[in-house]
Amino acid sequence: MTNSLYQELFEKHRLSEKIFLSLQNQHTVTYKEYINSVEKISFFFKEKGLSPGDRVALKLKKSHYFLSIYGACIHRGLIFLPLNHNYTDDELLYFLKDSESKLLITDKETCFQLKNKKLDKTFSIETVELDGSGSISNSSLKNKHYEKKPIERNLNDIAAILYTSGTTGRSKGAMITQENLLSNAKTLREYWCFDCEDNLIHALPIYHTHGLFVATNVILLSSAKMIFLEKFELEAITNNLPYATVLMGVPTYYSRLLESKKLTKLLVKNIRLFISGSAPLTKETNDRFFKATGKRILERYGMTETNMICSNPYKGFRISGKVGFPLPGIDVRIVDQVSGQLLSHGQVGEVQVKGKNVFSGYWKMLSKTADSFTKDNYFKTEDLGKFDNNGYLEIVGRLKDLIISGGFNVYPKEIEDVINSIEGIKENAVIGVPHKDLGESILSIIIKEESIKIDSKKISEILTKKLAKYKCPKGYIFINSFPRNTLGKILKNKLREEYKDYFK
Ligand code: MLC
Ligand code: AMP
């Protein structure tokens, strides 16, 4: 037994003076500096008495400290639990309680807000600020030892838990193993031809699979560099494009880039690869981008539970509107969702996946986990797709009631439950409809109680207190009755069709 993930991604960089991160403030972080901070934080965790398998939650704005804590968790065998820094207190408390986290690392503001909340006696909070101050700060770690030897871990051990919302409204913690991360990082490095000369523009959030595992792990494995931006800002991206070799993003990045007058063939001449994923990239955006830059965006497909599944080829023909071939070692099949029968090329069914990339289950949800796998151990993605005769997969829809807004997943049920709890609401449905910038955006359709006065402003105010901003509807419509099927179920397809031009 060793700690393969730590050895292959982190340990080899201990003495490297090479730059790992170029930060927005012109500062850089070398690999050696990075691993030093990882080892110091690991020592700090040891002093705190954390044991392998304990959950360490993180709710921090994007910074290089976040990545150090990630490395330190892998080093000490702790389960890394990254959370969106925009979560409200209610959301945060749910994740902390459900995961039975031993430690939360956050900013002073969140720490203050949690002061009076009832949490387990063994739970503690540490702080890190963007300027490097806080209880896990540069100065408090200064005299700490470097904890060199990583804790031994098995490939089946859980390295991280990523919460994904669910169709039932309750978020599920996807347990991601060392092997899931290592196998996927190795596959992607090979498939996308990453090497130590690469310089990736990293503008993605780092609490999701995309920004954390796909981007960061591939760079660590390849000993490459990242231009580490706090978030997606058009100006910062266009300023950095001449110095980078790869950009990874969600489709909104590419539609926004197309709005920039600065986007020319010359600007992107050093970029060897533009990658898009997490949401459907329209054929129109891909083709327009090709026309503007001479470079064809490579679209890939993945999920929190499975890491990356399919990709268009690096060297071969990239087809816009399709997500490419199953990655090496990953088995993808299309199955009739009712009969369970295997379907052939051209037929639409559920995409099912098997391989070392597939997670080990949902945290403390045995029956949900069992329901999510077939008897022969394929994971049911609840995405609808079909293979063409050349073996390219196309995602054509979803079985799950899910909205993907700017690459963020939003499950309508979670929002509907909150809206339903508001006095004066009789019934409501939340749907996703086309949005030029975000791909899809959230629309709330409501039937009000006649006797109580309530308007969209009031509803919006209540929602913002309970839900992270990206989950809050961008529009409200009040109606008198819903279209329904014979069982009385609201026909969301009809609503989506009726309001498809709402944000146009
Ligand atoms: C921010 N806001 C959003 C939003 N992002 N609202 C809806 N959908 C979104 N995606 C809200 C903010 O709360 C804020 O509200 C306002 O919009 C502006 O905030 P901002 O921070 O300035 O947003 P912006 O820069 O415009 O961000 C949009 C974005 C960003 C698309 C650049 O959301 C983004 O980086 N998305 C990437 C998500 C991602 O990495 N997904 C990977 C999931 S992993 P207000 O009211 O205050 O103005 C996965 C697996 C896989 O899916 O296959 O990869
Ligand atoms: P998440 O739960 O955040 O990991 O999101 C995973 C979901 O995002 C998948 O199940 C798909 O529905 C969607 N997705 C990811 N990549 C793509 C893509 N390239 N095209 C279409 N949908 C995608």
Image (spheres, helix red, strand yellow):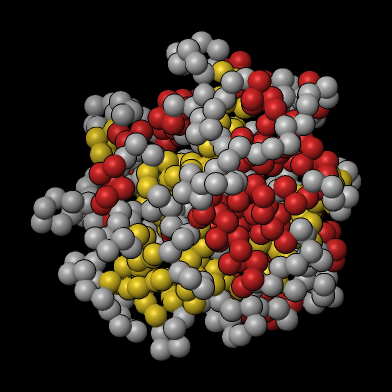
Is 498 placed left or right of 131 in the picture?
left
Figure quadrant of residue 455? top left
Q: Is residue 439 visible?
A: no
Q: Position of residue 435 (x, y in %)?
A: 51, 59
- The outermost residue toward the bottom is 389
Figure quadrant of residue 197? bottom right
Q: Position of residue 459 (x, y in %)?
A: 41, 32
Q: Which residue is depicted at the point 45% across and 69% down?
A: 330
Q: Which residue is depicted at the point 54% across and 68% down?
A: 300
Q: Position of residue 323 (x, y in %)?
A: 50, 73
Q: Which of the pair 38/467 is nearer the observer? A: 38
Q: Is residue 429 above or below residue 313?
A: above
Q: Which of the pair 202/352 is nearer the observer? A: 352
Q: Is residue 456 visible?
A: yes
How many numbered discs, if any? Answer: 0
Is 488 placed left or right of 226 in the picture?
left
Figure quadrant of residue 298? bottom right
Q: Which residue is depicted at the point 38% across and 53% down?
A: 402
Q: Which of the pair 61/42 is nearer the observer? A: 42
Q: Which residue is depicted at the point 50% across and 34% down?
A: 53
Q: Which of the pair 451/225 is nearer the observer? A: 225
Q: Is residue 86 above or below residue 483?
A: above
- The outermost residue toward the left is 486
